[in-house]
Image (cartoon, grey):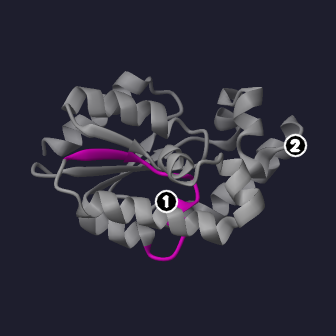
Amino acid sequence: MSGVQKIFLVGYMGCGKSTLAKRLARRLGWRMVDTDHEIEVLEGASVADIFHYEGEEHFRGMERRVIEREMAGEEPVVVSTGGGLPAWQDNMVQMNRAGLTVYIRRSAEQIASRLSPYGRQKRPKLRGLNDEELVAFMAENMKERAPWYEQARLILDAGQCSDEELVRQILHELNQ
């Protein structure tokens, strides 16, 4: 995989993509882009507000524009994608063509235990759910998205791994 200039981290919301992308980009000396953050800057509104006022279709179109920009760019980049981005249109196919896609896989229970109250509030689909409802919703939603996530070139079971172990696994794959 040497020669790869684009890495796309995919997986369910709250699985740790943004944190991992920052660490990986720092280790590689590459730029890091978080699609949610980029959209918030472009739109001047939070993801939750964009979903509420503009709708999911608008948000997914913005995600697509951000990844298209990064795929077309010359600079090496690590991209942390939104949880639903891989399941939208042909985004996974395009990211697989452009670089290395890495699925950060965790169970619904693992992700729920990682989410702070703020983490729940900022994600429109998780607002107002109690712990049991949260896990049930995420498990079902993850099952629906699994066919797209599993198209990633590298699948990492992140449940028992530290961020450093995950970074090492990705770096190992890059050096193959």
Vertical position of residue 73 compared to residue 169: above or below = below
- Quarter where residue 43 is shown: bottom right
Disc 1 marks a residue whose amino acid type is Tyr
Queried whether the magenta region covers residue 140, the answer comes back as: no
Please tell me how crowded label 1 is: few (under 14), some (14-19), or many (20+) other residues with Cα within 10 Å. Answer: many
Callout 2 environment at 10 Å: few (<14), some (14 to 19), or many (20+)?
some
Q: Quadrant of residue 68?
A: bottom left
Question: Start and end of the magenta stretch?
Answer: 76-90
Distance from the alpha carbon under mark 2 to that under mark 1: 24 Å
The local secondary structure at tag 2 comes to loop
Q: Residue at x 50, y 76 (%)?
A: 89
In front here: 3 or 52?
52
- Towards the viewer: 67 or 149: 67
The residue shown at (65%, 45%) is 46
Residue at the image position 72 percent from the left and 26 percent from the top: 116
Describe residue 9's horizontal placement relative to residue 61 as left or right: left
Residue for badge 1 = 149
Quarter of the image with the C terminus in it: top left
Measured as percent of width and height from the top left, residue 131 is found at: 85, 35
Q: Please count the marks in the image.
A: 2
Image location (x, y in percent) of residue 12: 58, 49
Marks 1 and 2: in contact by CB < 8 Å? no
First in residue order: circle 2 vs circle 1? 2
Q: Is residue 147 left or right of residue 115?
A: left
Q: Amino acid at mark 2?
A: Leu
The numbered dot on residue 129 is 2
